[in-house]
Image: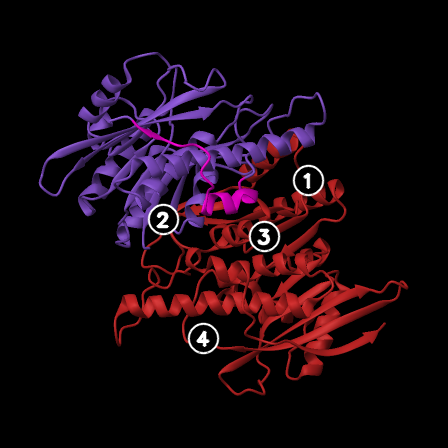
Amino acid sequence: MECRVLSIQSHVVRGYVGNKSATFPLQVLGFEVDSINSVQFSNHTGYGHWKGQVLTAEELNVLYEGIKLNNVNHYDYILTGYSRDISFLVTVVDIIKELKKANPSLVYVCDPVMGDQGAMVSSYPHTSSYAKWQPLLLFCDIIFHRLLTGRKINTEEDAIEVMDLLHKMGPETVVLTSTDLPSKQGDQFLVALGSQKIKKPDGTNTDQKICMDIPKVDAVFVGTGDLFAALMLAWTHQHPKDLKTACEKTVSVMHHVIKRTITYANEMAGPGKRPTPAQLELRMVQSKADIENPAIVVEAKVLQKSSQ
Amino acid sequence: MECRVLSIQSHVVRGYVGNKSASFPLQLLGFEVDSINSVQFSNHTGYSHWKGQVLTADELHVLYEGIKLNNVHHYDYVLTGYTRDTSFLEMVVDIVQELKRANPNLVYVCDPVLGDHGSMVRLLIIRVPCCMCVHAVMDLLHAMGPDTVVITSSDLPSRLGDRFLVSLGSQRHVRPDGSRTTQRVRLEVPKVDAVFVGTGDLFAAMLLAWTHHYPTDLKTACEKTFSVMHHVIQRTISYAHELAGPGRRPSPPQLELRMVQSKADIEDPAIVTEATVIS
Protein backbone atom coordinates (compact mmCIF):
# COMPACT_ATOMS: atom_id res chain seq x y z
CA MET A 1 0.00 0.00 0.00
CA GLU A 2 1.42 3.37 -0.94
CA CYS A 3 -0.66 5.92 0.85
CA ARG A 4 0.61 9.24 2.13
CA VAL A 5 -1.08 11.33 4.79
CA LEU A 6 -0.26 14.93 5.67
CA SER A 7 -1.22 15.49 9.28
CA ILE A 8 -1.25 19.02 10.69
CA GLN A 9 -1.82 18.71 14.42
CA SER A 10 -0.24 19.52 17.75
CA HIS A 11 2.80 17.76 19.16
CA VAL A 12 3.29 17.02 22.81
CA VAL A 13 6.62 15.89 24.21
CA ARG A 14 4.85 13.51 26.56
CA GLY A 15 1.59 11.74 25.95
CA TYR A 16 -0.87 11.16 23.17
CA VAL A 17 -2.80 13.97 21.59
CA GLY A 18 -2.74 15.46 18.10
CA ASN A 19 0.08 14.10 15.96
CA LYS A 20 1.33 11.91 18.80
CA SER A 21 -2.08 10.24 18.87
CA ALA A 22 -2.53 9.93 15.12
CA THR A 23 0.92 9.07 13.77
CA PHE A 24 1.83 5.76 15.42
CA PRO A 25 -1.50 4.02 14.62
CA LEU A 26 -1.39 5.18 11.01
CA GLN A 27 2.21 4.04 10.63
CA VAL A 28 1.40 0.69 12.22
CA LEU A 29 -1.34 0.31 9.61
CA GLY A 30 1.12 1.01 6.80
CA PHE A 31 0.47 4.67 6.00
CA GLU A 32 3.30 7.09 5.28
CA VAL A 33 2.68 10.01 7.61
CA ASP A 34 4.14 13.44 6.97
CA SER A 35 3.51 15.54 10.05
CA ILE A 36 3.51 19.27 10.56
CA ASN A 37 3.44 20.08 14.27
CA SER A 38 1.19 23.08 14.81
CA VAL A 39 2.48 23.44 18.36
CA GLN A 40 5.07 21.79 20.53
CA PHE A 41 3.97 21.55 24.17
CA SER A 42 5.42 19.61 27.05
CA ASN A 43 2.08 17.78 27.47
CA HIS A 44 -1.64 18.34 26.92
CA THR A 45 -3.42 21.19 28.62
CA GLY A 46 -5.33 18.95 31.04
CA TYR A 47 -2.27 18.51 33.27
CA GLY A 48 -1.50 20.81 36.23
CA HIS A 49 1.06 22.59 34.07
CA TRP A 50 1.91 22.86 30.41
CA LYS A 51 4.53 24.84 28.50
CA GLY A 52 5.65 25.23 24.94
CA GLN A 53 5.58 27.03 21.64
CA VAL A 54 3.08 27.51 18.83
CA LEU A 55 3.65 27.57 15.09
CA THR A 56 2.54 30.76 13.38
CA ALA A 57 0.66 30.81 10.10
CA GLU A 58 3.80 32.20 8.47
CA GLU A 59 5.96 29.36 9.81
CA LEU A 60 3.39 26.82 8.61
CA ASN A 61 3.58 28.39 5.19
CA VAL A 62 7.38 28.19 5.21
CA LEU A 63 7.29 24.47 5.99
CA TYR A 64 4.81 23.84 3.22
CA GLU A 65 6.97 25.85 0.84
CA GLY A 66 9.85 23.48 1.56
CA ILE A 67 7.68 20.48 0.67
CA LYS A 68 6.42 22.21 -2.46
CA LEU A 69 9.85 23.32 -3.69
CA ASN A 70 10.95 19.69 -3.64
CA ASN A 71 7.85 18.76 -5.62
CA VAL A 72 6.74 16.27 -2.99
CA ASN A 73 3.44 17.97 -2.21
CA HIS A 74 1.44 14.91 -3.20
CA TYR A 75 -0.85 13.41 -0.62
CA ASP A 76 -3.74 10.99 -0.55
CA TYR A 77 -5.13 12.30 2.72
CA ILE A 78 -4.84 15.37 4.80
CA LEU A 79 -5.74 15.20 8.47
CA THR A 80 -6.16 18.25 10.65
CA GLY A 81 -7.47 18.80 14.13
CA TYR A 82 -8.47 21.70 16.25
CA SER A 83 -7.04 25.18 15.79
CA ARG A 84 -7.91 28.34 17.66
CA ASP A 85 -5.92 30.65 15.44
CA ILE A 86 -7.93 31.96 12.48
CA SER A 87 -4.93 32.97 10.38
CA PHE A 88 -3.46 29.50 10.94
CA LEU A 89 -6.71 27.93 9.84
CA VAL A 90 -6.83 30.12 6.73
CA THR A 91 -3.29 29.00 5.81
CA VAL A 92 -4.32 25.37 6.31
CA VAL A 93 -7.23 25.91 3.93
CA ASP A 94 -4.93 27.45 1.32
CA ILE A 95 -2.58 24.49 1.60
CA ILE A 96 -5.44 22.04 1.20
CA LYS A 97 -6.70 23.86 -1.88
CA GLU A 98 -3.26 23.56 -3.44
CA LEU A 99 -2.89 19.92 -2.51
CA LYS A 100 -6.26 19.23 -4.08
CA LYS A 101 -5.04 20.81 -7.31
CA ALA A 102 -2.00 18.53 -7.18
CA ASN A 103 -4.22 15.52 -6.42
CA PRO A 104 -7.96 15.93 -7.07
CA SER A 105 -8.61 12.63 -5.29
CA LEU A 106 -7.23 14.00 -2.03
CA VAL A 107 -9.44 13.24 0.93
CA TYR A 108 -9.56 15.84 3.67
CA VAL A 109 -10.31 14.38 7.05
CA CYS A 110 -11.32 17.14 9.38
CA ASP A 111 -12.09 16.74 13.05
CA PRO A 112 -12.77 20.33 13.83
CA VAL A 113 -13.80 20.33 17.41
CA MET A 114 -12.87 19.10 20.85
CA GLY A 115 -16.03 18.50 22.85
CA ASP A 116 -15.18 20.65 25.83
CA GLN A 117 -14.51 23.61 23.67
CA GLY A 118 -18.10 23.93 22.65
CA ALA A 119 -18.35 27.44 24.02
CA MET A 120 -15.42 28.55 21.91
CA VAL A 121 -16.84 27.01 18.80
CA SER A 122 -20.19 28.67 19.20
CA SER A 123 -18.48 32.02 19.00
CA TYR A 124 -16.25 30.94 16.13
CA PRO A 125 -16.84 33.57 13.48
CA HIS A 126 -15.79 31.73 10.37
CA THR A 127 -18.21 28.84 10.42
CA SER A 128 -19.14 29.47 6.83
CA SER A 129 -15.56 28.82 5.79
CA TYR A 130 -15.98 25.22 6.92
CA ALA A 131 -18.61 24.81 4.25
CA LYS A 132 -16.30 26.29 1.67
CA TRP A 133 -13.60 23.75 2.44
CA GLN A 134 -15.79 20.99 1.08
CA PRO A 135 -14.22 18.40 3.27
CA LEU A 136 -14.89 14.94 1.96
CA LEU A 137 -14.83 13.39 5.35
CA LEU A 138 -16.22 15.29 8.20
CA PHE A 139 -16.48 14.40 11.83
CA CYS A 140 -18.98 16.28 13.80
CA ASP A 141 -19.22 17.05 17.39
CA ILE A 142 -22.78 17.54 18.52
CA ILE A 143 -22.28 21.22 19.06
CA PHE A 144 -20.52 21.72 15.81
CA HIS A 145 -23.21 20.07 13.77
CA ARG A 146 -25.80 22.28 15.40
CA LEU A 147 -23.79 25.23 14.29
CA LEU A 148 -23.57 24.03 10.74
CA THR A 149 -27.05 22.71 10.28
CA GLY A 150 -29.04 24.49 12.96
CA ARG A 151 -30.76 21.24 13.86
CA LYS A 152 -30.96 19.43 17.15
CA ILE A 153 -31.00 15.63 17.27
CA ASN A 154 -33.84 14.17 19.32
CA THR A 155 -34.70 11.13 17.25
CA GLU A 156 -33.05 8.80 14.78
CA GLU A 157 -34.97 10.60 12.01
CA ASP A 158 -33.41 13.88 13.15
CA ALA A 159 -29.97 12.25 12.96
CA ILE A 160 -30.59 11.04 9.43
CA GLU A 161 -31.78 14.49 8.41
CA VAL A 162 -28.72 16.15 9.94
CA MET A 163 -26.36 13.75 8.18
CA ASP A 164 -28.09 14.39 4.85
CA LEU A 165 -27.79 18.14 5.43
CA LEU A 166 -24.07 17.69 6.11
CA HIS A 167 -23.68 15.62 2.94
CA LYS A 168 -25.10 18.55 1.00
CA MET A 169 -22.22 20.69 2.28
CA GLY A 170 -19.75 18.39 0.61
CA PRO A 171 -18.60 15.45 2.71
CA GLU A 172 -19.31 12.01 1.33
CA THR A 173 -18.79 10.49 4.74
CA VAL A 174 -20.28 11.91 7.89
CA VAL A 175 -19.89 10.50 11.37
CA LEU A 176 -21.68 11.73 14.46
CA THR A 177 -19.36 10.38 17.10
CA SER A 178 -21.73 10.93 19.97
CA THR A 179 -25.33 12.02 20.26
CA ASP A 180 -27.86 12.37 23.04
CA LEU A 181 -30.08 9.77 21.47
CA PRO A 182 -31.15 7.18 24.02
CA SER A 183 -29.56 3.79 23.46
CA LYS A 184 -31.70 0.68 23.35
CA GLN A 185 -29.03 -0.95 25.51
CA GLY A 186 -29.56 1.45 28.37
CA ASP A 187 -27.92 4.53 29.81
CA GLN A 188 -24.45 2.99 29.98
CA PHE A 189 -24.32 3.38 26.22
CA LEU A 190 -24.32 6.30 23.81
CA VAL A 191 -25.41 6.30 20.21
CA ALA A 192 -23.15 7.11 17.27
CA LEU A 193 -24.24 7.31 13.65
CA GLY A 194 -22.60 7.37 10.27
CA SER A 195 -23.58 7.97 6.68
CA GLN A 196 -21.67 7.34 3.49
CA LYS A 197 -22.57 8.19 -0.08
CA ILE A 198 -21.78 5.44 -2.53
CA LYS A 199 -21.92 5.51 -6.30
CA LYS A 200 -23.38 2.29 -7.72
CA PRO A 201 -21.89 0.64 -10.85
CA ASP A 202 -24.90 1.82 -12.82
CA GLY A 203 -24.09 5.42 -11.92
CA THR A 204 -26.90 6.01 -9.45
CA ASN A 205 -26.26 7.21 -5.94
CA THR A 206 -27.05 5.36 -2.81
CA ASP A 207 -26.06 5.81 0.77
CA GLN A 208 -25.33 3.56 3.70
CA LYS A 209 -26.43 4.76 7.11
CA ILE A 210 -25.34 2.97 10.23
CA CYS A 211 -25.90 3.25 13.93
CA MET A 212 -23.85 1.93 16.85
CA ASP A 213 -24.32 1.64 20.59
CA ILE A 214 -21.03 2.45 22.26
CA PRO A 215 -20.31 1.71 25.93
CA LYS A 216 -19.76 4.90 27.91
CA VAL A 217 -16.52 5.20 29.85
CA ASP A 218 -16.30 6.62 33.31
CA ALA A 219 -13.29 8.82 32.72
CA VAL A 220 -12.18 11.84 30.77
CA PHE A 221 -9.67 11.00 28.10
CA VAL A 222 -7.59 13.32 26.03
CA GLY A 223 -6.42 12.38 22.60
CA THR A 224 -9.19 9.90 21.89
CA GLY A 225 -10.81 12.20 19.31
CA ASP A 226 -7.53 12.48 17.43
CA LEU A 227 -7.07 8.73 17.56
CA PHE A 228 -10.63 8.22 16.35
CA ALA A 229 -10.13 10.48 13.33
CA ALA A 230 -6.88 8.74 12.39
CA LEU A 231 -8.49 5.31 12.70
CA MET A 232 -11.53 6.34 10.64
CA LEU A 233 -9.12 7.52 7.96
CA ALA A 234 -7.34 4.17 8.04
CA TRP A 235 -10.39 1.92 8.11
CA THR A 236 -12.45 3.82 5.55
CA HIS A 237 -9.37 3.61 3.32
CA GLN A 238 -9.23 -0.17 3.80
CA HIS A 239 -13.00 -0.54 3.45
CA PRO A 240 -13.98 2.26 1.07
CA LYS A 241 -17.53 1.12 0.40
CA ASP A 242 -18.26 -0.43 3.74
CA LEU A 243 -18.85 2.17 6.40
CA LYS A 244 -20.28 -0.52 8.71
CA THR A 245 -16.98 -2.43 8.88
CA ALA A 246 -14.88 0.75 8.99
CA CYS A 247 -16.86 2.02 11.96
CA GLU A 248 -16.88 -1.33 13.74
CA LYS A 249 -13.10 -1.59 13.49
CA THR A 250 -12.55 2.01 14.54
CA VAL A 251 -14.84 1.85 17.55
CA SER A 252 -13.42 -1.56 18.53
CA VAL A 253 -9.85 -0.25 18.51
CA MET A 254 -10.98 2.71 20.61
CA HIS A 255 -12.59 0.29 23.06
CA HIS A 256 -9.43 -1.82 23.47
CA VAL A 257 -7.16 1.20 23.87
CA ILE A 258 -9.47 2.84 26.37
CA LYS A 259 -9.98 -0.32 28.41
CA ARG A 260 -6.25 -0.93 28.60
CA THR A 261 -5.71 2.68 29.59
CA ILE A 262 -8.34 2.66 32.34
CA THR A 263 -6.97 -0.57 33.81
CA TYR A 264 -3.44 0.76 33.86
CA ALA A 265 -4.47 4.15 35.19
CA ASN A 266 -6.42 2.65 38.07
CA GLU A 267 -3.51 0.34 38.83
CA MET A 268 -1.13 3.30 38.93
CA ALA A 269 -3.46 5.45 41.03
CA GLY A 270 -4.19 2.77 43.59
CA PRO A 271 -7.51 1.65 45.09
CA GLY A 272 -10.08 4.37 45.65
CA LYS A 273 -7.94 7.11 44.10
CA ARG A 274 -8.76 9.03 40.93
CA PRO A 275 -6.08 8.67 38.26
CA THR A 276 -4.20 11.82 37.24
CA PRO A 277 -3.98 13.14 33.66
CA ALA A 278 -0.45 11.73 33.44
CA GLN A 279 -1.69 8.28 34.48
CA LEU A 280 -4.59 8.49 32.01
CA GLU A 281 -2.40 8.89 28.92
CA LEU A 282 -3.52 6.43 26.28
CA ARG A 283 -1.69 3.10 26.29
CA MET A 284 -0.93 3.52 22.65
CA VAL A 285 2.29 1.60 22.26
CA GLN A 286 0.91 -1.27 24.31
CA SER A 287 -2.16 -1.48 22.05
CA LYS A 288 -0.25 -2.17 18.85
CA ALA A 289 -1.83 -5.59 18.25
CA ASP A 290 -5.34 -4.20 18.74
CA ILE A 291 -4.63 -1.38 16.32
CA GLU A 292 -3.33 -3.79 13.68
CA ASN A 293 -6.12 -6.30 13.96
CA PRO A 294 -8.94 -5.32 16.29
CA ALA A 295 -11.26 -7.93 17.73
CA ILE A 296 -14.71 -6.55 16.90
CA VAL A 297 -16.62 -5.68 20.06
CA VAL A 298 -19.43 -3.54 18.69
CA GLU A 299 -21.79 -4.27 15.83
CA ALA A 300 -23.07 -1.48 13.69
CA LYS A 301 -26.66 -1.66 12.49
CA VAL A 302 -27.43 -0.66 8.94
CA LEU A 303 -30.34 1.77 9.14
CA GLN A 304 -31.50 2.09 5.61
CA LYS A 305 -30.37 2.00 2.04
CA SER A 306 -32.16 4.55 -0.06
CA SER A 307 -31.66 5.73 -3.58
CA GLN A 308 -31.61 9.42 -4.30
CA MET B 1 7.90 -3.59 29.73
CA GLU B 2 7.72 -0.07 31.10
CA CYS B 3 10.60 1.83 29.64
CA ARG B 4 10.57 5.53 28.84
CA VAL B 5 12.94 7.26 26.46
CA LEU B 6 13.42 11.01 26.15
CA SER B 7 14.58 11.71 22.62
CA ILE B 8 15.86 15.17 21.73
CA GLN B 9 16.38 15.21 17.98
CA SER B 10 15.25 16.97 14.85
CA HIS B 11 11.84 16.58 13.28
CA VAL B 12 11.22 16.59 9.57
CA VAL B 13 7.75 16.88 8.12
CA ARG B 14 8.64 14.40 5.40
CA GLY B 15 11.09 11.54 5.67
CA TYR B 16 13.11 9.75 8.29
CA VAL B 17 15.85 11.48 10.21
CA GLY B 18 16.20 12.40 13.87
CA ASN B 19 13.03 11.79 15.87
CA LYS B 20 11.18 10.60 12.79
CA SER B 21 13.81 7.88 12.40
CA ALA B 22 14.00 6.92 16.05
CA SER B 23 10.44 7.10 17.40
CA PHE B 24 8.48 4.61 15.32
CA PRO B 25 10.99 1.74 15.70
CA LEU B 26 11.28 2.30 19.45
CA GLN B 27 7.50 2.44 19.81
CA LEU B 28 7.17 -0.77 17.79
CA LEU B 29 9.52 -2.40 20.25
CA GLY B 30 7.37 -1.30 23.19
CA PHE B 31 9.23 1.78 24.41
CA GLU B 32 7.37 4.91 25.52
CA VAL B 33 9.01 7.71 23.59
CA ASP B 34 8.80 11.30 24.76
CA SER B 35 10.18 13.48 22.00
CA ILE B 36 11.49 17.02 22.02
CA ASN B 37 11.90 18.27 18.47
CA SER B 38 15.06 20.35 18.31
CA VAL B 39 14.08 21.63 14.88
CA GLN B 40 11.11 21.29 12.56
CA PHE B 41 12.18 21.21 8.91
CA SER B 42 10.21 20.31 5.81
CA ASN B 43 12.74 17.54 5.03
CA HIS B 44 16.40 16.70 5.57
CA THR B 45 19.10 18.95 4.23
CA GLY B 46 20.18 16.55 1.50
CA TYR B 47 17.22 17.58 -0.66
CA SER B 48 17.58 20.51 -3.11
CA HIS B 49 15.51 22.66 -0.78
CA TRP B 50 14.71 22.66 2.86
CA LYS B 51 12.87 25.11 5.10
CA GLY B 52 11.88 25.31 8.70
CA GLN B 53 12.49 26.51 12.22
CA VAL B 54 14.92 25.69 15.02
CA LEU B 55 14.31 25.42 18.74
CA THR B 56 16.42 27.73 20.88
CA ALA B 57 18.11 26.66 24.10
CA ASP B 58 15.54 28.74 26.00
CA GLU B 59 12.62 27.07 24.28
CA LEU B 60 14.13 23.68 25.03
CA HIS B 61 14.37 24.71 28.67
CA VAL B 62 10.73 25.84 28.69
CA LEU B 63 9.59 22.47 27.39
CA TYR B 64 11.63 20.63 29.99
CA GLU B 65 10.22 22.90 32.67
CA GLY B 66 6.74 21.80 31.70
CA ILE B 67 7.70 18.15 32.09
CA LYS B 68 9.41 18.86 35.41
CA LEU B 69 6.54 20.90 36.86
CA ASN B 70 4.28 17.91 36.32
CA ASN B 71 6.84 15.69 38.05
CA VAL B 72 7.04 13.37 35.07
CA HIS B 73 10.74 13.90 34.34
CA HIS B 74 11.57 10.26 34.95
CA TYR B 75 13.30 8.50 32.13
CA ASP B 76 15.21 5.30 31.62
CA TYR B 77 17.04 6.54 28.55
CA VAL B 78 17.93 9.84 26.95
CA LEU B 79 18.70 9.79 23.24
CA THR B 80 20.19 12.77 21.50
CA GLY B 81 21.72 13.34 18.14
CA TYR B 82 23.83 15.93 16.47
CA THR B 83 23.58 19.58 17.29
CA ARG B 84 25.61 22.50 16.04
CA ASP B 85 24.47 24.96 18.66
CA THR B 86 26.70 25.03 21.74
CA SER B 87 24.18 26.74 24.00
CA PHE B 88 21.58 24.15 22.97
CA LEU B 89 24.01 21.36 23.76
CA GLU B 90 24.77 22.90 27.14
CA MET B 91 21.05 22.98 27.92
CA VAL B 92 20.80 19.32 26.89
CA VAL B 93 23.64 18.47 29.26
CA ASP B 94 21.95 20.35 32.12
CA ILE B 95 18.75 18.45 31.46
CA VAL B 96 20.55 15.11 31.33
CA GLN B 97 22.33 15.88 34.61
CA GLU B 98 19.02 16.63 36.28
CA LEU B 99 17.41 13.53 34.84
CA LYS B 100 20.29 11.48 36.19
CA ARG B 101 19.66 12.91 39.64
CA ALA B 102 16.01 11.87 39.32
CA ASN B 103 17.07 8.41 38.07
CA PRO B 104 20.70 7.42 38.68
CA ASN B 105 20.23 4.42 36.38
CA LEU B 106 19.48 6.64 33.41
CA VAL B 107 21.36 5.62 30.29
CA TYR B 108 22.37 8.42 27.97
CA VAL B 109 22.70 7.28 24.38
CA CYS B 110 24.63 9.79 22.40
CA ASP B 111 25.48 9.72 18.73
CA PRO B 112 27.99 11.28 18.50
CA VAL B 113 29.44 12.54 21.71
CA LEU B 114 31.11 15.91 21.77
CA GLY B 115 34.12 16.56 23.92
CA ASP B 116 33.95 16.68 27.64
CA HIS B 117 30.45 15.39 28.19
CA GLY B 118 31.76 11.86 27.98
CA SER B 119 31.74 11.45 31.73
CA MET B 120 28.03 10.84 31.83
CA VAL B 121 27.73 8.79 28.74
CA ARG B 122 26.94 5.15 29.33
CA LEU B 123 26.37 4.11 25.76
CA LEU B 124 28.22 5.72 22.98
CA ILE B 125 28.25 5.33 19.27
CA ILE B 126 31.12 6.70 17.34
CA ARG B 127 32.30 6.69 13.80
CA VAL B 128 36.07 6.49 13.67
CA PRO B 129 37.25 7.58 10.25
CA CYS B 130 40.90 6.82 10.60
CA CYS B 131 42.78 3.65 11.14
CA MET B 132 43.73 3.40 14.77
CA CYS B 133 44.22 0.54 17.09
CA VAL B 134 40.63 -0.16 17.83
CA HIS B 135 41.17 -1.77 21.21
CA ALA B 136 43.03 1.34 22.26
CA VAL B 137 40.27 3.56 20.96
CA MET B 138 37.55 1.63 22.70
CA ASP B 139 39.49 1.53 25.99
CA LEU B 140 40.06 5.25 25.73
CA LEU B 141 36.37 5.81 25.26
CA HIS B 142 35.48 3.50 28.15
CA ALA B 143 37.85 5.52 30.31
CA MET B 144 35.72 8.58 29.58
CA GLY B 145 32.69 6.89 31.10
CA PRO B 146 30.63 4.79 28.71
CA ASP B 147 30.07 1.17 29.60
CA THR B 148 29.22 0.37 26.01
CA VAL B 149 31.08 1.62 22.97
CA VAL B 150 30.23 0.85 19.35
CA ILE B 151 32.41 1.84 16.45
CA THR B 152 29.95 1.73 13.58
CA SER B 153 32.52 1.79 10.82
CA SER B 154 36.26 1.61 10.68
CA ASP B 155 38.86 1.26 7.96
CA LEU B 156 39.94 -2.12 9.18
CA PRO B 157 40.11 -4.55 6.29
CA SER B 158 37.28 -7.05 6.34
CA ARG B 159 38.08 -10.73 6.03
CA LEU B 160 35.13 -10.94 3.63
CA GLY B 161 36.67 -8.55 1.13
CA ASP B 162 36.33 -4.92 0.12
CA ARG B 163 32.54 -5.03 -0.21
CA PHE B 164 32.44 -5.17 3.59
CA LEU B 165 33.42 -2.85 6.40
CA VAL B 166 34.27 -3.72 9.96
CA SER B 167 32.26 -2.58 12.95
CA LEU B 168 33.24 -3.17 16.55
CA GLY B 169 31.66 -3.10 19.93
CA SER B 170 32.90 -3.24 23.48
CA GLN B 171 30.94 -3.60 26.67
CA ARG B 172 32.17 -3.50 30.25
CA HIS B 173 30.39 -5.45 32.97
CA VAL B 174 30.80 -5.87 36.66
CA ARG B 175 30.39 -9.53 37.57
CA PRO B 176 28.40 -10.59 40.65
CA ASP B 177 31.71 -11.16 42.45
CA GLY B 178 32.69 -7.57 41.77
CA SER B 179 35.31 -8.24 39.13
CA ARG B 180 35.24 -6.45 35.81
CA THR B 181 34.97 -8.03 32.42
CA THR B 182 34.88 -6.67 28.89
CA GLN B 183 33.11 -8.27 25.94
CA ARG B 184 34.40 -7.19 22.56
CA VAL B 185 32.69 -8.08 19.30
CA ARG B 186 33.43 -7.58 15.65
CA LEU B 187 31.02 -7.59 12.70
CA GLU B 188 31.60 -7.70 8.96
CA VAL B 189 28.93 -5.43 7.53
CA PRO B 190 28.12 -5.29 3.80
CA LYS B 191 28.78 -1.90 2.26
CA VAL B 192 25.94 -0.21 0.45
CA ASP B 193 26.32 1.72 -2.75
CA ALA B 194 24.23 4.71 -1.79
CA VAL B 195 24.14 7.62 0.60
CA PHE B 196 21.44 7.32 3.17
CA VAL B 197 20.23 9.88 5.60
CA GLY B 198 18.70 8.91 8.89
CA THR B 199 20.43 5.55 9.16
CA GLY B 200 22.67 6.74 12.00
CA ASP B 201 19.64 7.89 13.97
CA LEU B 202 17.90 4.58 13.34
CA PHE B 203 21.05 2.72 14.36
CA ALA B 204 21.29 4.58 17.67
CA ALA B 205 17.63 3.90 18.44
CA MET B 206 17.97 0.21 17.60
CA LEU B 207 21.15 -0.19 19.62
CA LEU B 208 19.31 1.39 22.56
CA ALA B 209 16.46 -1.07 22.13
CA TRP B 210 18.53 -4.20 21.68
CA THR B 211 21.07 -3.47 24.42
CA HIS B 212 18.07 -2.89 26.66
CA HIS B 213 16.70 -6.33 25.77
CA TYR B 214 20.15 -7.96 25.96
CA PRO B 215 21.95 -5.97 28.64
CA THR B 216 24.86 -8.39 29.07
CA ASP B 217 24.98 -9.77 25.55
CA LEU B 218 26.51 -7.22 23.22
CA LYS B 219 26.94 -9.89 20.54
CA THR B 220 23.19 -10.45 20.18
CA ALA B 221 22.37 -6.76 20.59
CA CYS B 222 24.74 -5.87 17.75
CA GLU B 223 23.58 -8.71 15.51
CA LYS B 224 19.97 -7.62 15.82
CA THR B 225 20.80 -3.95 15.36
CA PHE B 226 22.93 -4.47 12.28
CA SER B 227 20.41 -6.94 10.85
CA VAL B 228 17.54 -4.46 11.16
CA MET B 229 19.69 -1.87 9.41
CA HIS B 230 20.39 -4.35 6.63
CA HIS B 231 16.72 -5.14 6.01
CA VAL B 232 15.61 -1.50 6.07
CA ILE B 233 18.41 -0.44 3.76
CA GLN B 234 17.88 -3.29 1.29
CA ARG B 235 14.16 -2.55 1.11
CA THR B 236 14.92 1.13 0.63
CA ILE B 237 17.45 0.55 -2.15
CA SER B 238 15.08 -1.77 -4.05
CA TYR B 239 12.23 0.68 -3.81
CA ALA B 240 14.40 3.68 -4.72
CA HIS B 241 15.68 1.98 -7.85
CA GLU B 242 12.18 0.94 -8.81
CA LEU B 243 11.02 4.55 -8.52
CA ALA B 244 14.03 6.03 -10.26
CA GLY B 245 13.92 3.64 -13.19
CA PRO B 246 16.70 1.66 -14.89
CA GLY B 247 20.09 3.35 -15.09
CA ARG B 248 18.99 6.42 -13.14
CA ARG B 249 20.30 7.54 -9.78
CA PRO B 250 17.57 7.74 -7.13
CA SER B 251 16.85 11.18 -5.67
CA PRO B 252 16.87 12.02 -1.95
CA PRO B 253 13.05 11.75 -1.68
CA GLN B 254 13.19 8.34 -3.32
CA LEU B 255 15.93 7.24 -0.93
CA GLU B 256 13.93 7.94 2.22
CA LEU B 257 14.06 4.91 4.48
CA ARG B 258 11.20 2.43 4.03
CA MET B 259 10.54 2.58 7.72
CA VAL B 260 6.83 1.84 7.90
CA GLN B 261 7.21 -1.00 5.42
CA SER B 262 9.96 -2.57 7.57
CA LYS B 263 7.80 -3.01 10.64
CA ALA B 264 8.15 -6.81 10.76
CA ASP B 265 11.93 -6.62 10.41
CA ILE B 266 12.16 -4.07 13.18
CA GLU B 267 10.02 -6.17 15.52
CA ASP B 268 11.82 -9.43 14.86
CA PRO B 269 14.86 -9.17 12.60
CA ALA B 270 16.17 -12.20 10.78
CA ILE B 271 19.87 -12.26 11.67
CA VAL B 272 22.02 -11.64 8.62
CA THR B 273 25.29 -10.65 10.26
CA GLU B 274 27.03 -12.78 12.81
CA ALA B 275 29.18 -11.06 15.37
CA THR B 276 32.45 -12.65 16.41
CA VAL B 277 33.44 -12.36 20.03
CA ILE B 278 37.03 -11.22 19.91
CA SER B 279 37.85 -11.13 23.59
Q: Which mark is residue A217?
A: 4
Task: Give the label on residue B258, or none.
Answer: none
Q: Are marks 2 and 1 on the same chain?
A: yes
User: Which of the marked residues, 3 or 2, is nearer the chain's N terminus?
Assistant: 2
The answer to whether residue B24 of the structure is visible from this angle is no
Q: Position of residue A6 (x, y in %)?
A: 60, 45
Q: CA distance from mark 4 to mark 2?
A: 29 Å
Q: Are marks 3 and 2 in contact (CB under 8 Å)?
A: no
Q: Which residue is mark 2?
A: A51
Reading the image, the residue beneath label 1 is A74
**Secondary structure state at the residue bearing disc 1:** loop
Q: Is residue B269 magenta?
A: yes
Q: Identify the disc placed on residue A80.
A: 3
Sequence-first disc among 4 and 2: 2
Q: Dot 3 falls on which chain?
A: A
Q: Chain of mark 4?
A: A
Left or right of A173 on screen, residue B2: left
Amino acid type assigned to the residue bearing label 1 in the image: His
In terms of sequence position, does the residue under pointer 4 or pointer 3 come before the other? Answer: 3
Q: Are marks 4 and 3 in contact (CB under 8 Å)?
A: no
Residue A45 falls left or right of residue A196: left
Furthest toward the right, the residue is A202
Dots 3, 1 in contact, CB < 8 A: no
Chain that the image shows in red: A
In the rendered structure, the colour chosen for chain B is purple
Mark toward the viewer: 3 or 1: 1
Give the alpha-carbon distance from disc 2 to disc 1, as whole Å. 33 Å
Asked if the stretch drawn in magenta spans residue B12, the answer is no
Q: Is residue A90 above or below residue B155?
A: below
Type of the residue with mark 3: Thr
Q: Quadrant of residue B159?
A: top left
Classed neighbour count for the residue bearing mark 3: other residues with Cα under 10 Å, few (<14), some (14–19), many (≥20): many
